């Protein structure tokens, strides 16, 4: 993705879809020139991933939560 940003083919760096250990390793990578702009992780009331979210905030990486209601499985079990 860095190769696409340099010549102007993209206006931002890679968007991660990674768990915390992989994200930490990526930021230590010696060839990393452009820090990722965001990380898409599963975050919802039943899975907070506070460590991953905190790590992203500390490194100015935007957190994009997907499947925020676990396909309503959590709601179904509580309210059915």
Image (cartoon, helix red, strand yellow):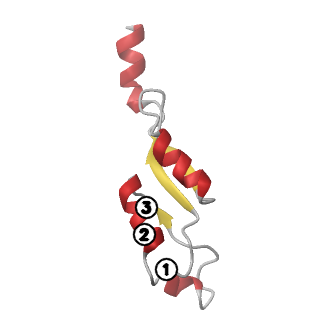
Alpha carbons under labels 1 and 3: distance apart: 12 Å
Q: Quadrant of residue 34?
A: bottom right
Residue located at (58% from left, 65% from top): 37
Secondary structure under tag 3 reads: helix
Q: How crowded is mark 2: few (under 14 residues within 10 Å), some or many (20 or more)?
A: some
Q: How crowded is mark 1: few (under 14 residues within 10 Å), some or many (20 or more)?
A: few
Could you tell me residue 20's position as x and y percent? 41, 53
Q: Please, is residue 74 above or below residue 30 in the view? A: above
Tell me if 21 is positioned left or right of 44 in this view.
left
Q: Are marks 2 and 1 in contact (CB under 8 Å)?
A: yes
Tell me if 5 is positioned left or right of 28 in this view.
right
Alpha carbons under labels 3 and 2: distance apart: 5 Å
Secondary structure under tag 2 reads: helix
- Residue 32 badge: 1
Residue 66 versus residue 47: which sits nearer the camera? 47
Tell me if 59 is positioned left or right of 43 in this view.
right
Could you tell me residue 15's position as x and y percent? 51, 64
User: What residue would you read off at disc 2?
Assistant: 26
- Residue 16 badge: none
Q: Please, is residue 63 above or below residue 71 in the view? A: below
């Amino acid at each position: 993705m860095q190769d696409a940003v340099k010549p102007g083919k993209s206006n931002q760096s890679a968007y991660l879809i990674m768990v915390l250990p992989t994200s930490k390793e990526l930021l230590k990578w010696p060839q990393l020139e452009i820090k990722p702009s965001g990380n898409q992780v599963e975050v919802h009331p039943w899975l907070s991933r506070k460590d991953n979210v905190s790590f992203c905030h500390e490194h100015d990486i935007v957190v994009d939560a997907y499947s925020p209601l676990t396909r309503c499985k959590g709601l179904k079990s509580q309210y059915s």
